Image: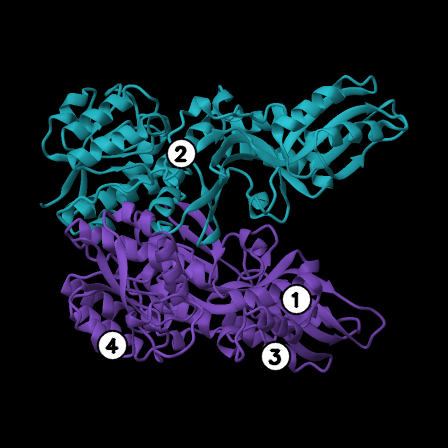
Chain colours: A cyan, B purple
Amino acid sequence: MNSIKIAVLGLGNVGKGVWKILRRHRNMIKEYIGVPIDVKKVLVRDVQKKRDIDVPPHMLTTNFDDILLDEDIRIIVELIGGLHPAYEYMRKAIEMGKHVVTANKAVIASYGRELIQLANERNVLLRFEGSVGGGIPIIAALTRSLAANEIEAVVGIINGTTNYILTQMTRYGMDFNTALKLAQEKGYAEADPSSDVEGEDAAFKLSILAFIAFGVQVPPQDIPREGITRISEKEIQYAAQLGYTIKLLAAARKHDGKLDLHVHPALVPNTHPLAAVNDEFNALFVKGDAVGELMMYGKGAGSLPTGSAVVSDIMDVASTMMSGSTTPYMYRNAREKLQINGEGEGEYYIRLEVVDRPGVLGKISTVLGNYGVSIASVVQRGKDERVVPLVLITHKVDRKRLDLALEEIKKFDMVEEVASILRVESHSN
Amino acid sequence: MNSIKIAVLGLGNVGKGVWKILRRHRNMIKEYIGVPIDVKKVLVRDVQKKRDIDVPPHMLTTNFDDILLDEDIRIIVELIGGLHPAYEYMRKAIEMGKHVVTANKAVIASYGRELIQLANERNVLLRFEGSVGGGIPIIAALTRSLAANEIEAVVGIINGTTNYILTQMTRYGMDFNTALKLAQEKGYAEADPSSDVEGEDAAFKLSILAFIAFGVQVPPQDIPREGITRISEKEIQYAAQLGYTIKLLAAARKHDGKLDLHVHPALVPNTHPLAAVNDEFNALFVKGDAVGELMMYGKGAGSLPTGSAVVSDIMDVASTMMSGSTTPYMYRNAREKLQINGEGEGEYYIRLEVVDRPGVLGKISTVLGNYGVSIASVVQRGKDERVVPLVLITHKVDRKRLDLALEEIKKFDMVEEVASILRVESHSN
């Protein structure tokens, strides 16, 4: 083999990054693998479109079959995004005996297991490091470097857009809409930001993490999620006064045969490494039974960071090809039947808006006590106003019990509003 | 193959961890590889010694040849530590066609390239993830997950003992000796702590990182290093007042064809992710030209965390064996001739003890200016004492120029002492 020929599907943000890295590091890659990697074809929607990148026009095609039927092309790099036709292209590529590298979170979250099994049957490789955490090698860590561990938890900040927004709100006291606008101006948020700010993007990635870490495949739409649209700058300030930073977390935690799985804003203690993950950065915190706590931090999106993951995957596939064998992809099977849970047990931050009157706290804590909810700390804010915020932090409690207690508390005359319920991320979870 | 037979050399702290993980996860490992991994023999110095671990006595041997000549044994796991006879055992194992997994920083730092080349020639695998950063998969990241990057810098906290000591000094205002004693009581420091506190251990690991990240092999003894024995709690307080935390850093940075390589205490801005790495934790900060900034954080030592890296390496070797091929180990060759530098350019924190008299600062800054050293900030501490500390932070400067300027400054009557020169780690380096 004089060179390994590949095709790239899609020439968007990540596609361009992949192209640039392959060009810039052609010699380094050749040295690593033994032969160079050459892009032979690039699938685009419109061949005529003006592009700020030097892809020779003869490489461009709008016809996937040009790529699929080209026997020279050994690796197909899928960077179109979205479920369809990306899924169909990948399936066909694998069936045709081609290796596939992708950064597509939607396809891997929904069809990951199926495609891996198909790839193993056809003796080809499927790699998808870029689908979660951009340049952070979390998939390699969970599948290879931590192979000797039973994974107990994966908790992460895996959406850069919301982390950027929350960071601006925290740092400058901005409100959500102002911070969102800034994120859009900076290119961190899309014109329609709903998938990011409502936690959908994070749920896709968490579905992949749950599969890789625990061997269970949960459809992303079944993962309970809450976005950050209801987080006010006031909440962030209250949290700060108590020593916490509010972050949008995606969490998968195993305990007692259950897997707690959810995306939600949470109070992270300032002493926790996740609290210091700011701006558009992502971080993944893993707990393994041998390694203990491990955190990886880096850029979770972007042309070059995600391109780094994709090109490293291509190099991995290429060097495996050169060795003349394909190791089947290792993934963990759920060894036990894991019951998929929502939030499960946790500590909670609750903000009530109450009429400032003696005895209020007593009545509320009695109801909480009746439902087995014990209080770790209480702060009453404001003075000389009719209605004041009452902030409680609970000890560990089942969310369902807490909700029942709050239903009852809501009915009190002096309780104007249960304004906020947020999970508290503790060091011990 | 019904099972893969391995031998473990050494039953110390890490050896016991490896044994425990292999036992605990026998089924998981079998599922991952296809066949179980069985320890057939364990090399110890004294077969009779009482051990708090359930290794069957018939497995123990004091004779390396029992292992070397046993054709059943396919992987040798070297966990004796130290240069000799560990190096000779590994060489012999490779020459005999056995795969080797090790956590030995001394041997890999001194003989890494030689052993890798030998392993590639003999078509066997050599893995050493556990040799740097304990359970943190930094070797896998640099060799595989970041393969598409040219690495620009690797900066880390890679000695848990000194990080524990500095954390106690920072958090509780302890002096060095009290913190060291505490570290010894907790088992984080050895009875003779010199290798840790004088930066030797970090230099070994940095030598390995420089090889893996930049393809250069620098003998650990040639790496300029400074330990933490001269860091006082006062220095830590001054640094804190300026917004910095003092950490022992191991740094390898490429610029202008040079490789700056050194181990030294440094002021890390509190906004830098490395500043939040506390207690016995390690962290590695990598800058790659595509991925940008990436940090990995975890337990850098200990029976189970290092055991996690070793067993994951064993599993990697075993699954490659099962696939019927051995991919040669990829390492980066220095593509350019890199000149090995000491500290190179940087920002510096300087504490002078000066007589509190008008005009002192003027004279000092004039001399610094003459040598091209410009000052970023100045803080004068203390009042109503004859001698007061004068703390300067410089802009980027070559260390040699700075030293020349300080030589001249030392000669002034009103300068009692150049009490401290510490590197400042900035975000942009």
Percent coordinates x, y for residue B194 in the rendering: 52, 78
A409 or A244, nearer to the observer = A409
Q: How many marks?
A: 4
Drawn side of residue B233 relative to residue A64, left or right: right
The secondary structure type at the circle numbered 3 is: helix
Q: Nearer the viewer, mark 2 or mark 1?
A: 2
Name the residue carrying label 1. B169
- Res A367 quadrant in image: top right
Q: Position of residue B162 (x, y in %)?
A: 55, 68
Q: As shown in the figure, which amino acid type bears the numbered disc 2?
A: Lys
| Foreground label between 4 and 3 | 4
Q: Is residue B342 visible?
A: no
* Discs 4/2, front: 2
Question: Is disc 1 placed on a helix, strand or loop?
Answer: helix
The residue under label 2 is A337
Looking at the picture, which amino acid does disc 4 mark? Phe
Residue type of the residue flagged with mark 3? Glu
Do callouts 3 and 2 point to residues on the same chain? no
Is residue B199 in view from this perspective? Answer: yes
Which residue is disc 3 drawn over? B408
Quadrant of the image for the N terminus of chain A? Answer: top left
Give the mark nearest the N terminus, 1 or 4: 4
Q: Which mark is residue A117?
A: none
Q: Quadrant of residue A395?
A: top right
Are there few (<14), some (14-19), or many (20+) residues within 10 Å of tag 4?
A: some
Q: Nearer the viewer, mark 1 or mark 4?
A: 4
Answer whether labels 3 and 2 touch (C-beta < 8 Å): no
CA distance for labels 4 and 2: 44 Å
Give whichever of B418, A119 is nearer the camera. Answer: A119
Q: Are marks 4 and 3 in contact (CB under 8 Å)?
A: no
Disc 4: host chain: B
Q: Are marks 4 and 2 in contact (CB under 8 Å)?
A: no
